[in-house]
Amino acid sequence: MTDADLRLVDMTLRDGMHAVDHQFTPEQMADVAGALDEAEMDVVEMSHGDGMGGSSINYGFAAADTEEYLEAVAPALTDTELSVLLLPGIGTVEELELAASKGADICRIATHVTEADISQEHFEYVDELGLEANGLLMLSHMEPPEKVLEQARLMEEYGADAVYVMDSAGAMLPSDARERVELLVDELSIDVGFHAHNNLGLAIGNTLAAVDAGAVTVDGCLRGLGAGSGNAQLEVLVGTLMKAGYDVNPDFFGTMDAAEEALLPMLDEETMPELDNDSLVLGYAGVYSSFLRHARRVSDEFGLDPRDVLVELGEMGVVGGQEDMITDVAARMAEEGSAAAEASQDDD
Amino acid sequence: MYKILARGDAVELERMIGIFPVEESEGLQAAVDEGVDVGTEGIDSVREHADEFDVVFEATSAKVHSQNAPVYRDLGLFAIDLTPAAVGPYTVPVVNLDDVVHSEDNINMVTCGGQATIPMIHAVDRVIDVGYAEMVSTIASKSAGPGTRHNIDEFTQTTSAGMEAVGGADEGKAIIVLNPAEPPIMMRNTIYAMVPDTVDIAEVRDSIYDMESEIQSYVPGYEVTLDPTVKGQDEVGFDLDGDVIVTTMIEVEGEGQHLPPYAGNLDIMTSAALGAAERIAAQPSAAGALGGDD
């Protein structure tokens, strides 16, 4: 932890990977990481958007493998700590070992908010490696605060140094963020973090509410890159936290420069984060943000409105990692749609 | 146990063996209730009663099976290993049972996800070479026991190894997702196979549906839910390098003898193990492998 009141984690090279279909090159990653290091960012997280081991048909193959990315990013950081993400069930302890050998300082282990008990072996392994371990409870909006606490306690027991309330669908209102963070801060002896998505336009507001409720480590991305409509925009977060009276490490203008000079030239109209109709529906329906680009492609394939597909997925209660269900749902909706069309033709 | 009692044809259940006294063991108590003989001393009970049976189904842990396997061999028992120990070769009845049953006395049933998806990889691979295969298995949270939860890496590692060794993929990747939705979801599996774009999809579909019928002979709740589709470069966000992706989705509903129907993941393991035992029993040449008289 830093001397500042808060720790800021930049995930441009991790959650931001969703926005570019995991196609950042190792060189691009090194450039962004260097700019963030210069801006005195506390932590830089890098990996496939779905964590190490996420490179796959289901989530999209990354432009390079984890080892190449680590070898590019680690040397670009001096004082900034390097974090990696792992989702048990997708990646394994083998990836954690690789990350440790390439210079990672922090391993963040993420599970669905009700499934913390699949992460024990990974926390124990990170402990063996002597690295900091953070637990991430994804889609925390789907469960009441007491359930989030129960699962956070498991991660604390397994050895997590901090546990995060993850608003993976960008579906929380500020009161939702506050209630969950507050309960965890009151009941746990480890640090509590918060991770926002902007699908309801609340990423900065929710993060401020979480910090106000006692969160001491928070996530963001340069320019608000990230899955769905993006995460909390980091340079905005730095500015608003300063205005709110918090002491933060990253340099305000430096963070802005990293966004505008290092990241922006790598984006185009297609990859620039935007709170558009489809991503708004993610937040409204409570669907995992990284489903967005997959849902668009699949809906296009089946001639459907992505919003209808996303609402249906939300009603089914799909969780992170179930990207394959998009095709399943779209195929069924397309079939039902053509059956309905035929039926109405028969009526004529 | 319930699977054998309900469906065992050539296979009879002689004894259920645990390591706790009957009154402390739900499983042994259930066996007693069904009129099945029991043993409470683990491997010592196996030794004591070894002359009664030919096949042992082991559903303990990888560590325990590794210790017990040499004992079964010494006793001339055929071991069907439902743990991830994999002392013997990975076995998916519909794909490779005939290859291993003559030469082996210990076979491993891979994982539930492996039993569900490896046959489909093989179904594609027997038509056109599968360079890379990937499976995503989503199971209801309620059907994932402490064993799976405590060592989830073992699931992905064992399944991907089976996808290569038995399924025929040059490279395999396995992903497991737990979904807590209520009512619990059925076990769902998606199988992606990366193949050259010269693939004849009609031929692949025929092969997949033939395989579905074969599996249904021992797993009645096994069903292809998405007609196999082909995705090309325009439908993905990464470089396919000239290949295409064949996607197949299946659902497995349990028979509901003892476990609820959503626990298709557990059902497919016991069904596959029983299927293997029945084929072992039916092999005329299996007497030697079964221990028998020698």
Image (cartoon, helix red, strand yellow):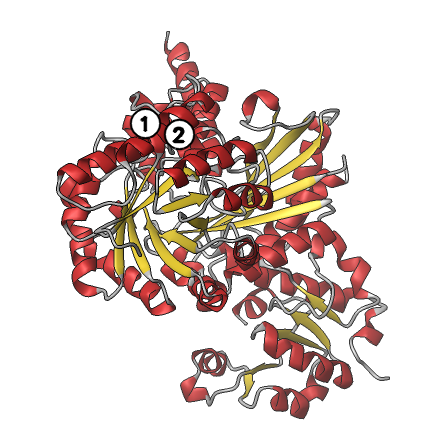
Does residue A203 appear in the picture of this structure? no
Callout 1 and callout 2 share a chain = yes
For disc 2, the chain is A
Which residue lies at the image location 28% right of the left edge and 40% below the top edge? A196
Q: Nearer the viewer, residue A120 or A271?
A: A271
Specify few, some or many for label 2: CA neighbours under 10 Å numbering under 14, 14-19, or 20 or more: many
Which residue lies at the image location 70% right of the left edge and 78% below the top edge? B69
- Residue ranking furthest to the top: A348
Q: Quick check: B273 left or right of A206?
A: right
| Amino acid tagged 2 | Leu
Q: Nearer the viewer, residue B201 or A88?
A: A88
Q: Which mark is residue A292?
A: 2
Say if mark 1 contacts mark 2, CB within 8 Å: yes
Numbered circles on residues, count: 2
SS state under label 2: helix
Q: Quick check: B159 left or right of A212?
A: right
| Residue, disc 1 | A279
Vertical placement of A180 versus A327: above or below? Answer: below
| Amino acid tagged 1 | Ser
- Which corner quadrant holds the C terminus of chain B? bottom right
Q: Nearer the viewer, residue A231 or B115?
A: A231
Vertical placement of A136 versus B151: above or below? Answer: above
